[in-house]
Structure formats: C-alpha cells, structure tokens
Image (cartoon, rainbow, N blue to C red):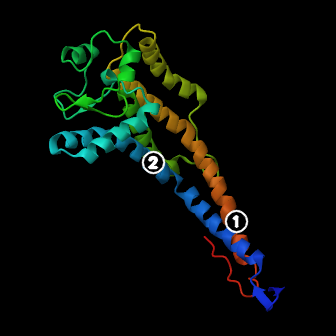
Amino acid sequence: MTARETERGIVVTLPSEGRTAQVAAAVDRLVAVLARHWLAVFNAVVAIFIALPFLAPTLLHLAATADCVACTRAGRLIYTIYSPTCHQLPERSFFLFGPQTTYSVTQLEAIGALPPGMTIWQRELLRFIGTPEIGFKVAFCERDVAIYVSILLSGLLFGLLRGRLRPADRPLPKLPLWGYALLLVPLAIDGGMQLIGWRESTWPSRLITGALFGAATVWLAYPYVQDAMDDVLRSTVERLTSLAKQPPQTGQKPPVGV
C-alpha cells in the first residue's frame, strides 16, 4: 500500500496498479463477450435496420386511420434518416396498406400521385412517400430490401453452419474474390442498364440481384470477421488467465477470469 502526507496527517490509498489491473480485466471480459457473440450483435443490428423502413409506412397508415400526430412525425423522421442510404424512388419501392405493392411511373402519374414529365432526379427530390389511397412506401427501395434481408438470412445461416464448416484448428473457408465478382455481375448488368437508360429494371430482377449481392457479401466478409474474433478471444482469454494466476496485492481482490 502507498501513503501520501497532507497537512492533517497521512492518507492511505490503494495502489494504482491494482485498480488498473481490475479495469483492464473488466475491459477484457467485455471484449471477450463481444468476440464470442459478434454475429448475434451483427444480426440484431441488421434486423433493426430492416424493420425501421417497414415501420415508417405502418406509422403513416396509423396516422391516417387513427389521427395519430406523433405517428406522422415518427414515420417521416424514419424516411429522413434513411434518405442518405437510398434514393427512395416511389416507382422502385414497395408500398404497404394500398391496393398494389408496386407502381410504375406511368401509374403514379395517371392517379395524380406524381406530376407528369418529371425527370428521375426531380422524382427523387420530390420525396413522395404515398397517400392513404395508394398506400405508403417502404423507406428504402426494393433492391435494398433484398440486399439487407439477404444479409440477415445469410448471417443466420452462417451462424448455423460455421461450426460444421470450420476444419480442425484452421480458418473458415472463404468465398473467393472471383466468386464474389461473379455473383455481382447480375447486379452490375441490371443496375447499369437502368442507370444509363437502356431499360427499366423490374421488381423481380431487383430482388434477385440484391439478394445475390447480400449473400455474396456475407460469405466473403463474415469468415474473415470470425477468424479475427477468434484471435481476439484467444488473446483476451490468455491475458485474463495470466491475471488470474498472479498473486493479489495487499488489500486487492484478484481479477475475475472468463
């Protein structure tokens, strides 16, 4: 133990080394928990990210049917939050609580939802979200729905299969880059032709190409993340085990292990 002199006498303090060791052990335990359960955290975040865009039209529908002012504000806030992540064009988005789930530009113009003759950039800036008569759109486009749902489903599948796919004491097999590039070709063709105006993609093509991209991204990236988390967990457990074996200093409790 250490002591320091003051005007009134001697004040006994705990050794700073002991406190530092306890804090370090607590941080290591937290890191170990995150390293063990990183996939559950990832999947939960993706699930919430998917759920909110579907909550937005639900809230606006409640606002229209139940006169809920707070629902209107919350729903519009979700659209605003997601606007940097997606163009949110109505002709490329799913609609809920209406007679149809998808609308073309021609249909939206015919029912007066969009002014006729607008360019794609003008439609994007208009930020049309729907009406009680035709329904309200999901807060991101059809392709994004497919991408993120595919990421979530692939993440859940990865969690079920990673133990079986891992060879003994060896890293997980990874999707090769050429395989990843191959799975991105349909997205590049469908999106590229749409971008340059050769053709307008359809909602089935957006779902298929988006799902391929999401699945490919998971099977390329997640095995690397798993290997990295395994290394983090291994080194963290070794540090905690080493701390637990050290004799505690006077007046200090030994760090709790994993």
In the image, residue 99 sits, relative to residue 39, either above or below, namely above
Q: Does residue 148 appear left or right of residue 108 in this picture?
A: right
Q: Residue furthest bottom?
A: 9
- Identify the secondary structure beneath mark 1: helix
N-terminal-most mark, 2 or 1: 2
Q: Is residue 172 visible?
A: no
Badge 1 amino acid:
Glu
Q: Is residue 24 visible?
A: yes
What residue did someone put label 2 on? 45
Q: Where does the N terminus fall, quadrant-wise?
A: bottom right
Name which residue lies at 74% across and 77% down: 18
**Residues tagged 2 and 1 counted as in contact (Cβ below 8 A):** no
Badge 2 amino acid:
Val
Label 1 CA crowd tier, 10 Å (few <14, some 14–19, many 20+)? some
User: Marks 2 and 1, Cα distance to the nearest angstrom?
Assistant: 29 Å
What residue did someone put label 1 on? 238
